[in-house]
């Protein structure tokens, strides 16, 4: 168990890193697949997920958008300025038989709302980039998006909830973040999701939520009261995101997959080591958490299993 001074040092590093990512410049997201500018050179078979059905024998044309949870931060070595990794769920889905990742335009620090020009490539710019490159069209089969956490400045919220005793700042910080999600984030998500479906009218939009970061009821770096409040805040954010997904799309809730694997658990899938990867999934989290949940709820969109709806 981490002593209180170490906890605050870790959280301080996390907050400073997040601020730097949101305010500092990054290179534009590349439009290619996970392994280069052109992902059409063939794929391996999905590890453990089996062959697909539901798309016939043709390939599944796939485009990925989103923030660091989509780019795969924490999963392995970072490949570019947007901090994409070969262990992020777009790359893992790309490895499935017949899936063609036409564009991985995810970028760490991305928000649903456009931020200043020197900030990370946000969702509106990601969509603009994909449209300009012809990646979103009537041939696109599937689009994934993970977005919204950075809009709520989650690191600042967690800092407000830090400490062995529940700080008085925790509940107000969460309430403020949830109110922002409901009043500002929600219409922005609806608008950007509509843009995606307009540019790719035949594609299924698959939108993921976020996991609980801390293991509820388990002694850890924050109080059990703060864990409960943060989990309730995550539920509220996920509900806002899910409500903006069009009826033709699929919302993927990853909370159940990460249950028992939060910070403070015996087998955490969330990193908390006092560095820039903190509060991101591990490689296992991306594989057994995000990818498994996507294939469970939207597998047929990737030629695997049968799709579930919201």
Image (spheres, rainbow, N blue to C red):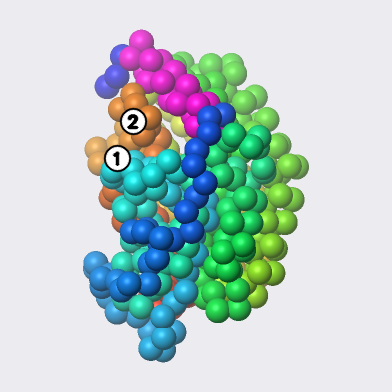
Q: Where is residue 120 drawn, in percent x and y?
A: 55, 39
Asked if residue 20 lies left or right of residue 299, the reply is: right
Q: Which of these two is toward me, 165 or 152?
A: 152
Q: Which residue carries the number 1 mark?
A: 268
- Specify the principal SS of the magenta part: helix
- Segment tinted magenta in the rendering: 5-22
Q: Nearer the viewer, mark 2 or mark 1?
A: 2
Whether residue 18 is in magenta: the answer is: yes
Q: Which of these two is toward me, 214 or 43?
A: 43
Q: Where is residue 106 drawn, in percent x and y?
A: 49, 51
Q: Are marks 2 and 1 in contact (CB under 8 Å)?
A: yes
Badge 2 marks a residue whose secondary structure is loop
The outermost residue toward the top is 5
Judge whether 272 appears above or below 35 on screen.
above
Badge 1 marks a residue whose secondary structure is loop
Whether residue 249 is in magenta: the answer is: no
| Distance in Å between CA atoms under marks 2 and 1 | 9 Å
Q: Which of these two is toward me, 11 or 228?
A: 11
Residue under the image location 66 percent in, 35 percent down: 116
Q: Which residue carries the number 2 mark?
A: 272
Q: Quadrant of residue 139?
A: bottom right
């Amino acid at each position: 168990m981490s002593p209180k001074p170490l906890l605050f040092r870790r959280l301080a590093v996390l907050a400073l890193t997040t601020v730097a990512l949101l305010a500092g410049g990054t290179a534009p997201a590349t439009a290619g697949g996970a392994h280069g500018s052109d992902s059409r050179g063939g794929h391996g078979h999905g590890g453990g997920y089996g062959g697909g059905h539901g798309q016939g024998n043709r390939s599944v044309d796939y485009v990925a958008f989103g923030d660091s949870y989509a780019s795969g931060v924490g999963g392995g070595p970072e490949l570019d300025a947007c901090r994409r990794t070969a262990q992020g769920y777009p790359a893992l889905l790309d490895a499935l038989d017949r899936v063609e990742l036409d564009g991985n335009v995810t970028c760490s620090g991305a928000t649903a709302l456009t931020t200043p020009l020197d900030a990370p490539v946000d969702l509106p710019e990601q969509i603009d980039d994909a449209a300009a490159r012809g990646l979103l069209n009537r041939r696109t089969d599937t689009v994934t998006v993970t977005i919204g956490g950075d809009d709520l400045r989650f690191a600042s919220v967690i800092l407000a909830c830090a400490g062995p005793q529940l700080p008085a700042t925790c509940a107000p910080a969460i309430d403020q973040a949830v109110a922002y999600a409901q009043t500002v984030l929600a219409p922005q998500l609806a608008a950007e999701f509509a843009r995606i479906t307009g540019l790719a009218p035949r594609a299924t939009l698959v939108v993921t939520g976020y996991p609980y970061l801390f293991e509820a009821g388990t002694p850890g770096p924050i109080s059990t009261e703060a864990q409960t409040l943060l989990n309730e805040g995550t539920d509220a954010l996920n509900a806002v995101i899910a409500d903006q997904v069009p009826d033709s799309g699929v919302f993927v809730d990853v909370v159940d997959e990460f249950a028992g694997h939060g910070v403070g658990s015996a087998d955490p899938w969330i990193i908390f080591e006092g560095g820039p990867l903190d509060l991101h999934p591990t490689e296992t989290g991306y594989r057994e958490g995000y990818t498994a949940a996507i294939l469970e709820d939207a597998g047929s969109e990737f030629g695997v299993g049968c799709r579930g709806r919201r």
